[in-house]
Image (cartoon, helix red, strand yellow):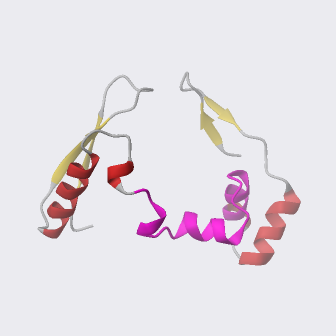
Amino acid sequence: MIAAATSSLEWVLRPPPPETAVRALMARTGWPWAVCALLVQRDLTDLEALRRFLRPRVDHFEPPERLAVKDSLKGAKFIKAATSATRRFISWGGSPRFSRPKAISASTWV
């Protein structure tokens, strides 16, 4: 079962996926039951949807200038420059669901 966070930050277990759908995905992919069960619970049963989810390409994403985030293009350029120069930086991000932002240390050599 997969747990999902609700607005009150409580975990709610989803019902198990249909066995037939999991077995069908296993037959098409050759992947283990646990992997296929997680993908079925996320409604990822179409092979093209699986490819896009598991191996996204840059053209699958919205360009930063179209995102509704202030200065997202400026941030994307900074991250690109930092990774090109193998510089380290810290990205602060938050969510309306959380009371304080979390720091994420990003090493550019990864």
The residue lying toward the viewer, choosing from 109 and 61, is 61
Residue found at x 38% / y 46%:
67
Is residue 63 left or right of 35 when viewed as pictured? Answer: left
Is residue 1 left or right of 9 when viewed as pictured? Answer: right
Residue found at x 11% / y 68%:
85
The residue lying toward the viewer, choosing from 63 and 32, is 63
Relative to 16, say whether 34 is above or below: below
Is residue 8 left or right of 93 when viewed as pictured? Answer: right
Q: Does the magenta run of residues contain 64?
A: no
The rendered magenta stretch, by its main secondary structure, is classed as helix
Residue found at x 41% / y 68%:
58
Q: How many marks?
A: 0
Relative to 6, say whether 103 is above or below: below
What percent of the width, then of the height, locates residue 72?
A: 28, 47
Quarter of the image where one finds residue 29: bottom right
Quarter of the image where one finds residue 7: top right
Magenta residues (range) = 35-62
Quarter of the rendering occupied by the C terminus: bottom left
Q: Does the magenta run of residues contain 36?
A: yes
What percent of the width, then of the height, locates residue 103?
A: 26, 40
Is residue 25 left or right of 81 when viewed as pictured? Answer: right
What percent of the width, then of the height, locates residue 30?
A: 72, 78
Relative to 104, say whether 20 is above or below: below
What percent of the width, then of the height, locates residue 16?
A: 79, 47
The residue lying toward the viewer, choosing from 6 and 70, is 70
Which residue is farthest front?
Answer: 66
Residue found at x 16% / y 52%:
89
